Amino acid sequence: MQGSLFTKLASRVASLTGEIYPLHVGDSWLTPPPGAHMQDLVTDAHPGLNRYARPHGDPALLEALASAHGVGREQLLITTGATGALDAIANTFLDPGDEVLVCAPFWPLIRGIVTASRGVPVEVDVMVELAGEALGAALEAAVTDRTVAVYVNTPHNPTGRVLSRESLDALVAVARRHDLWIWSDAVYAHHAYRGEHIAVHDLAPERTFEVHSFSKAWAMAGNRCGYMLGPSEGDHMKRVRRTSTHTFYSAPTASQVAALAALEHGEDWLAASRTHYQAAGDAAADRLGVPRPEGGTFLFLDVADHLDASGLEGFMHRCMDHNLVLAPGTSCGTAYGTHVRVCFTSAPPHVVARGVDVLATLLGA
């Protein structure tokens, strides 16, 4: 497992004082919907909060998700966030040396998840400029006889893109042609602002593992609760369940109760949060002079023209001189050593705005 630039900067981040602009982490300044806070959960109403949940998930939560997706409960697994879901998939289906095509730039943890399962992440740079058949052609060119899966994330972390039907059709065609699994990261499915979010599982249900998280849609990152929607054919979910039982065993009981409360009573909150997030993203993009995000909670900027001999590390130190913390583009792919990722939901809007203003000033905007 390779180290990261951010690891080298962690001690500097920890030493910052005063108002800090933590735009490096994909979190939410909002709190969960009413009824889904931890203090809302009492044992009189929910006996057994201190006990293990069933390994595959709370039956009521599974039933609610099965209804929402129009599938049977056997296709679902409640997980410790989307991270736990992807880890279980990787541990189940990767043999040492197996390759996973990772659409880059990518969510920073996926590279390590593949590596930790003794797989080989193959970065395919398609998410900044390529679309449609060009995206498919780039993936096709990267396939080898060791390729077993392709990972895709839409709405996208870090670029803010929402992939079109044409682009996803091209990706699915490659997967079907070479009999690849599709690992679809849909944690921002509720945050498409421009264009339509298309569920990859709907396009290729026979080969798609689609992961979701209550961390993003419902502001529950600390709860560690997500879920997986598996293929419609075969016994593949049974295999993943066996793996998950021997890794995280079950998602936290109270977190699953809170997740169900959000699903049942949080639609108005979800709509309002989407409006808040889009406004924050648009304001940040306008200040920085870049296109407004199509979805998600990030902007991805190339700062090459503002780097000196100290490179990206030096630029990030200059940001931290002003208490601004960003994520380095190298965490999202080896080809992005001149980029930074900016999260516009990780702090209250007025704090984010001040941090974005610091960045804009450093960039001469």
Image (cartoon, rainbow, N blue to C red):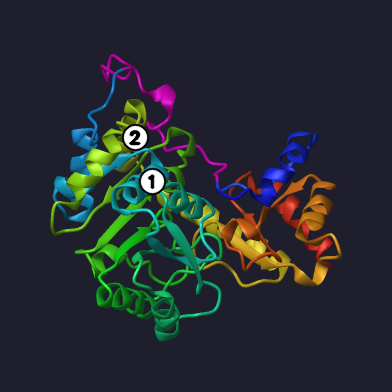
x, y percent for residue 356? 73, 56
Residue 330, visible in the rendered structure: yes
The residue drawn where x is 34% and y is 18% is 42
The picture quadrant where one finds residue 176 is: bottom left
Determine the residue located farthest toward the top in the rendered image. Answer: 44
Query: Which residue bears the numbered disc 1?
Result: 87
Camera-side residue: 159 or 135? 135
Secondary structure of residue under mark 2: loop
- Label 2 is placed on what type of residue? Thr
Q: Is residue 42 magenta?
A: yes
Secondary structure of residue under mark 1: helix
Query: Which residue bears the numbered disc 2?
Result: 247
- Label 1 is placed on what type of residue? Asp
The picture quadrant where one finds residue 128 is: bottom right
CA gap between label 1 and label 2 equals: 9 Å
Q: Which range is magenta?
A: 27-50
